[in-house]
């Protein structure tokens, strides 16, 4: 199967400093809500936080709910290891996010928005509050009623999962809820809620300003638009890059690798590890016609060169997950502990190499049965690393 | 009428009401889906994942307990995928569990053990995780033992403590591999707001929460020829014990229970129902005296509504949560403690026994009673009034250990002196029972007539509604109670501490105009007590309640004040209700406690 696009193309929308946000806001607010939804839907923007749910559809479903109170929440609980783009957006172009939230509130009928900010990003609060104040002042001037407040997380990785985030905001222990009901019908405080990632909201600003076509023209089929990538690891140029979706990993490595790239972890600790031999056949985008893999989380790209032990990499990921699982559901809580103890036992020779196959079977169960998106994806790194670097696990 | 939708379960067409979960749909069509964190008394958690099923067309498996049925759903509960996943999950739970089953108190009555047996988990492939975690067993409470090494984190106890009881003594703390069920600041159970009600034990699927048992102590006392061992049995035990011995819920086993106790070797088998009747006399007069002070003497210091004090879980709850309302509690001891105080005084004297040679044992549907017997106030006989409290479950264990074929036992009768009771004493075991018994007596004392209800059945206070209200208008009273003429006696009944909270919040807000409230800590009253057979469910409690009321209906005496032994004890010993002896032996005081 051929790809529509192989090429790595840079884009520059997110961090482009637009000095006309007031104009964009009032112009967009003067359009009928349905038109805004249609525009978003035709752009084919998908959530940039991880799950890739179509943004326009999310807004549409929430707008259709009849409740009198609804909420807009910006998910800024950026906790995936190797992801650091949202804090950059909030520091450099916060107004894009604020405009998007206000427009969303207008479309769905919500008067209140919250930014759920990762606890470690507390230092952003003063500047962000200044931006919010300025923004709300302008909203008042144009007689638009929309309030935004910041809610600081307390450090649990799981609270980035949308329903755990609601529980956390409600003052409860942050644990993912059963779905259905989905947030579009019952989210924060049981009210219909749109919850979008910081980057997703920033992209909607681009769409409001330049129109859906401009966005749609970027990327490839099923993976439209551009995306921020947090590039880290063994690379001469770590940082945040906005790239069009659909590029091949080969291209990516040629651009960012150090010439000795052995593998790339795509999508953070809960994503997949792609070994060198699969770079060419892997495209970066959402699941669809692409043969490659999706972006399960936020666009983290961690490069590893041949000096790295994949056992250590996996050990590190699993240690993270056994601590950061919320602990409520069996497959994730116990599964992570078993994977973590399991690779250690194999390495020490306490369990035979075939035990890895038993654990691979276990990862299938974890994917099938865990309660939330995190639990379903924690084992991705295990299965992709063990399948591709089995010998490093054993010897 | 809610809309019906059509689904298939394992290819079998099923019609279900809209909104039902897959688990409920399967249940109604005779398909069993195993579950652990699900319990009929509690909200859905969906966290153990044992109940996963396949919904055709979906990539992942769904938790049957948490997934509502949708039109056209094709559900497979026993596909290879489901079986393998389920087995994995059970193996995972076992790997984290201290699976030393033969040394576990719940051996033979453990939901995890049953699942392991069903799925024939014969080998241990996964690495045992329990030994790596440094667990300690909390044995500080006289009622409840908490062993985290056996906990499977289903959170049933947490939901029980929050939803049924509103106490929140147990909660989830930490995350990931360190996630556990614990208390405020990880204090011991006897150091927190825990009311010892034992509902967490009743809802725990494994041996993580069990009662502190005193079986060996009681065997030793029985075996000691120098001791006279007296046993009393609470009203709810006789409608629960059968379940623990293989009978259907709602089986009345009073006669067999008495026979079994005699075979176990107790020197005298007596009835807590006797002191239940006594409680009614004392508490009824206390209520009337409070009403008189309030209505005739216009004494503003009299606290109304008066609340019942039979349930030690409720007592500890109010001591923690509403310490400013302790004076609203009746000063009457619970029937267990009245019995204990009388055994080592009245009974000892009548039987010419030295009280220090008497061991008084009580069989209770309750774990809070263990705490109550341990209270420093409960030594009014000069000795510890009740030495050992056993739950219904512990009694069943003793019966099994003694090799008694319970089914074949001939009915026996309670021994005399404190063994006679009325139907009013029996219904203490059900929510609303104390109220009904009290009304039967109070109304008769005041008017000289029976309560104006058919067959003395005061149906408005019966049932399983969380809070129930009733009122009786007093007309044509006896001359000495003339001040009550035309007074409408307003009562409320609540069971489950979350309902107690509703009533007390109304009292605190000044919105309550009741004279008398009955509160039982456990759902359904004592028949749903924390010491009763496991499992429990609304249906099982309903069956036990029916049995209690049937027992009452079949009693020759239905009113406490007509119990001849009660008349005799006042004649021979107590002289009069609320008299000096009563005050000394049958009444008590309470202590305010902190919430934290």
Image (cartoon, helix red, strand yellow):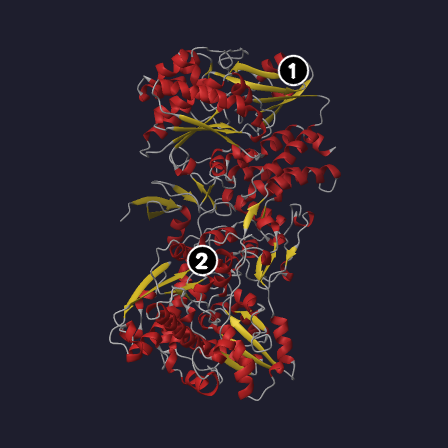
Q: Is A366 or A187 nearer to us in this picture?
A: A187
Residue A299 in the figure: left or right of residue B301: right
The answer to whether one can see residue B127 in this image is yes
Residue at the image position 61 percent from the left and 79 percent from the top: B222
Per the rendering, the mark at residue B32 is none
Q: Residue B459: x, y in percent?
A: 31, 67
Residue at the image position 47 percent from the left and 57 percent from the top: B322
Say which chain tag 2 marks: B
Task: Find the distance from the CA under tag 1 to the CA under tag 2.
Answer: 64 Å
Say which chain tag 1 marks: A
| Residue named by callout 2 | B497
Q: Is A243 or B485 nearer to us in this picture?
A: B485
Residue at the image position 66 percent from the left and 16 percent from the top: A235
Mark 1 residue crowding within 10 angstroms, few (<14) / some (14–19) / many (20+): many
Residue A27 in the figure: left or right of residue B418: left
The answer to whether one can see residue A201 in this image is no
Q: Mark 2: which secondary structure? A: helix
> Is B51 located above or below residue A158 in the figure?
below
Residue A207 in the figure: left or right of residue B453: right
Give a yes or no on whether discs 1 and 2 share a subunit.
no
Q: Residue B249: x, y in percent?
A: 43, 67
Per the rendering, the mark at residue A257 is 1
Mark 2 residue crowding within 10 angstroms, few (<14) / some (14–19) / many (20+): many
């Amino acid at each position: 199967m051929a790809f529509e696009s192989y090429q790595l193309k840079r884009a520059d929308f997110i961090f482009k400093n637009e000095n006309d946000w007031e104009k964009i806001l009032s112009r967009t607010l003067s359009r009928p809500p349905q038109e805004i939804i249609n525009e978003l839907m035709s752009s084919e923007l998908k959530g940039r936080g991880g799950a890739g749910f179509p943004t326009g559809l999310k807004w549409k479903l929430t707008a259709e709910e009849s409740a009198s109170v609804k909420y807009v929440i910006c998910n800024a609980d950026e906790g995936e290891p190797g992801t650091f783009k949202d804090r950059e957006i909030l520091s450099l172009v916060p107004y894009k996010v604020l405009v998007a939230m206000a427009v969303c509130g207008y479309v769905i009928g919500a008067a209140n928005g919250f930014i759920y900010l990762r606890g470690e990003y507390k230092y952003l609060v003063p500047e962000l509050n200044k931006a919010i104040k300025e923004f709300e002042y302008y909203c008042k001037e144009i007689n638009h009623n929309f309030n935004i407040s910041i809610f600081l997380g307390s450090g649990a990785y799981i609270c980035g999962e949308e329903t755990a985030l609601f529980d956390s905001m409600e003052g409860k222990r942050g644990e993912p809820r059963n779905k259905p009901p989905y947030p579009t019908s019952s989210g924060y405080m049981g009210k219909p809620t749109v919850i979008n990632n910081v980057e997703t909201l920033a992209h909607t600003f681009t769409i409001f300003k330049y129109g859906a076509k401009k966005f749609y023209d970027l990327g490839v089929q099923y993976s439209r638009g551009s995306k921020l990538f947090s590039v880290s690891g063994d690379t001469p140029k770590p940082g945040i890059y906005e790239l069009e979706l659909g590029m091949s990993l080969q291209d990516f490595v040629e651009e960012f690798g150090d010439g000795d790239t052995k593998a790339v972890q795509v999508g953070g600790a809960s994503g997949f590890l792609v070994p060198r031999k699969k770079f060419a056949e892997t495209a970066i985008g959402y699941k669809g016609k692409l043969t490659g893999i999706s972006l399960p989380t936020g666009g983290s790209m961690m490069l590893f060169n041949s000096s790295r032990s994949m056992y250590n990499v996996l050990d590190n990921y699993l240690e993270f997950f056994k601590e950061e699982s919320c602990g409520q559901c069996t497959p994730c809580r116990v599964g992570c502990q078993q994977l973590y103890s399991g690779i250690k036992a194999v390495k020490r020779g306490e369990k035979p190499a075939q035990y890895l196959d038993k654990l691979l079977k276990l990862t299938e169960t974890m994917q099938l049965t865990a309660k939330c998106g995190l639990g379903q994806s924690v084992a991705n790194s295990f299965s992709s690393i063990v399948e591709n670097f089995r010998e490093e696990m054993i010897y | 009428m809610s809309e019906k939708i059509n689904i298939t379960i394992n290819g079998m067409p099923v019609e279900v009401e809209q909104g039902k979960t897959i688990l409920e749909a399967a249940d109604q069509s005779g398909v069993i889906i195993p579950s652990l964190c699900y319990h009929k008394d509690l909200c859905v958690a969906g966290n153990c994942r044992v109940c996963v099923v396949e919904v055709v067309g979906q990539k992942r498996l769904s938790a049957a307990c948490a997934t509502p049925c949708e039109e056209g759903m094709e559900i497979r509960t026993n596909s290879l995928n489901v079986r393998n996943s389920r087995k994995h999950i059970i193996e995972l739970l076992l790997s984290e569990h201290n699976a030393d089953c033969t040394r576990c108190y719940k051996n033979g009555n453990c939901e995890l053990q049953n699942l392991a047996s069903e799925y024939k988990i014969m080998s241990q492939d996964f690495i045992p995780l329990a030994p790596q975690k440094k667990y300690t067993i909390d044995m500080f409470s006289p009622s409840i033992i908490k062993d985290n090494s056996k906990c499977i984190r289903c959170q049933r106890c947490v939901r029980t403590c929050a939803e049924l009881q509103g106490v929140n003594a147990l909660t989830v703390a930490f995350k990931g591999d360190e996630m556990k069920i614990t208390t405020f600041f990880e204090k011991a159970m006897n150091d927190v707001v825990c009311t010892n009600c034992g509902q967490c034990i009743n809802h725990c699927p494994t041996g993580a929460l069990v009662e502190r048992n005193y079986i060996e102590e009681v065997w030793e006392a029985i075996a000691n020829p120098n001791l006279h061992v007296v046993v009393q049995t609470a009203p709810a035990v006789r409608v629960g014990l059968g379940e623990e011995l293989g009978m259907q819920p709602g089986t009345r086993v009073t006669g067999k229970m008495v026979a079994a106790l005699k075979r176990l070797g107790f020197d005298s088998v007596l009835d807590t129902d006797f002191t239940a009747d006594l409680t009614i006399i004392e508490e009824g007069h206390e209520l009337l005296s409070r009403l008189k002070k309030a209505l005739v003497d216009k004494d503003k210091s009299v606290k109304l509504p008066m609340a019942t004090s039979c349930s030690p879980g409720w007592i500890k709850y109010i001591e923690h949560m509403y310490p400013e309302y302790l004076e609203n509690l009746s000063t009457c001891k619970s029937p267990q403690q009245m019995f204990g105080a009388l055994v080592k005084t009245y009974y000892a004297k009548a039987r010419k026994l030295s009280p220090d040679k008497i061991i008084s044992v009580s069989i209770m549907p309750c774990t809070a009673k263990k705490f109550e017997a341990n209270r420093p106030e409960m030594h009014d006989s000069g000795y510890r009034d009740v030495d050992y409290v056993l739950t219904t479950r512990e009694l069943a264990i003793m019966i099994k250990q003694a090799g008694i074929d319970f089914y074949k036992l001939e009915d026996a009768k309670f021994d005399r002196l404190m063994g006679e009771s009325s139907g009013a004493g029996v219904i203490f075991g059900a929510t609303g029972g104390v109220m009904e018994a009290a009304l039967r007596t109070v109304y008769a004392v005041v008017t000289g007539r029976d309560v104006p209800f058919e067959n003395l059945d005061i149906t408005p206070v019966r049932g399983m509604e969380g809070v129930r209200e009733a009122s009786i208008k007093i007309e044509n009273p006896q001359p000495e109670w003339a001040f009550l003429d035309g007074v409408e006696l307003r009562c409320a009944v609540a069971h489950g501490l979350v309902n107690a909270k509703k009533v007390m919040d109304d009292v605190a807000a000044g919105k309550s105009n009741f004279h008398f409230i009955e509160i039982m800590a456990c759902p359904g009253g004592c028949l749903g007590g924390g010491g009763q057979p496991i499992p429990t469910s609304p249906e099982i409690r309903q069956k036990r309640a029916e049995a209690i009321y049937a027992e009452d209906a079949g009693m020759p005496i239905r009113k406490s004040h007509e119990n001849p032994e009660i008349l005799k004890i006042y004649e021979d010993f107590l002289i009069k209700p609320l008299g000096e002896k009563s005050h000394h032996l049958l009444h008590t005081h309470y202590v305010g406690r902190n919430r934290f």
